């Protein structure tokens, strides 16, 4: 994951949300860019290395302050699909609902990202 903003990220988020609003599937390139941008924003809003957010196949970032993970499987992992991540990051889906429905898999005592979502400065519902 880059340590600088994803080029065209904010515009891609807008296009993806517009596609969702129209009941359409967003173009793959826009979805990929939006996911990477939103993951980067999370890493900026919650700096650290105690939780790994995985959004296959587009992004993986380490975030949240706490003990640093260095080898093997991280003790705190959050994994979801690209559409769910965009919905969570923009406030169109609540963390608790996504976890309850199995759209988010969160393992570890620091893997609850509810306090960081929706992300600041992104379009909302």
Image (tube, rainbow, N blue to C red):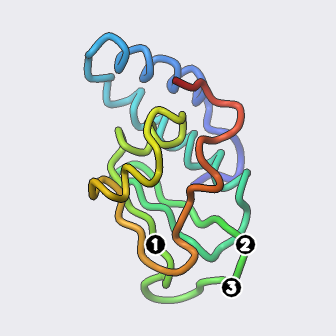
Q: Earlier in the sequence, mark 1 or mark 3?
A: 3
Q: Is residue 37 rendered to the left or right of residue 43?
A: left
Q: Nearer the viewer, residue 61 or 6?
A: 61
Secondary structure beneath disc 1? strand
SS at mark 2 in the image: loop
State yes or no: discs 2 and 3 in contact (Cβ < 8 Å): no
Question: For the image shown, how many numbered marks are present on the structure?
Answer: 3
- Up the image or down, 27 lies above or below 77; here it is above
Residue 72 x %, y %: 45, 88
Distance between mark 1 and mark 2 Cα atoms: 14 Å
Residue 74 in the image: above or below residue 97 = below
Residue 91 is left or right of residue 32, and the answer is right
Would you say the residues marked 1 and 3 are in contact, meaning their CB atoms lie under 8 Å apart? no
**Looking at the image, do the residues carrying marks 1 and 2 touch, with CB atoms under 8 Å apart?**
no
Residue furthest to the bottom in view is 71
- Answer with mark 1 or mark 2, whichever residue precedes in sequence: 2
Query: What's the distance in space between the residues labelled 2 and 3, CA to CA?
Result: 7 Å
Q: Secondary structure at mark 3?
A: loop
Q: Residue at x 43, y 39 (%)?
A: 93
Kindly identify which residue carries mark 1: 77
Q: Which residue is mark 3?
A: 67
Q: Residues within 10 Å of mark 1 (few under 14, many from 20)?
A: many
Q: Quadrant of residue 48?
A: bottom right
Residue 114, quarter of the rendered image: bottom right
Disc 1 versus disc 3: distance between alpha carbons?
Answer: 13 Å
Check disc 2 and report the residue beneath it: 65
Residue 27 rendering spot, x and y as whole percentages: 32, 23
């Amino acid at each position: 994951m880059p340590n600088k903003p994803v080029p065209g990220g904010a515009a891609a988020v807008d296009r993806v949300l517009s596609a969702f609003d129209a009941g359409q599937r967003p173009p793959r390139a826009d979805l990929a860019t939006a996911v990477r941008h939103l993951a980067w924003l999370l890493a900026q809003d919650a700096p650290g290395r105690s939780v790994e957010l995985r959004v296959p196949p587009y992004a993986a970032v380490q975030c949240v302050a706490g003990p640093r993970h260095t080898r093997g499987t991280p003790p705190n992992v959050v994994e979801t699909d690209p559409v769910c991540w965009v919905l969570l990051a923009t406030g169109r889906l609540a963390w608790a609902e996504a976890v309850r429905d199995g759209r988010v898999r969160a393992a570890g005592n620091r893997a609850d990202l509810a306090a960081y979502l929706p992300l600041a400065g992104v379009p909302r519902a």
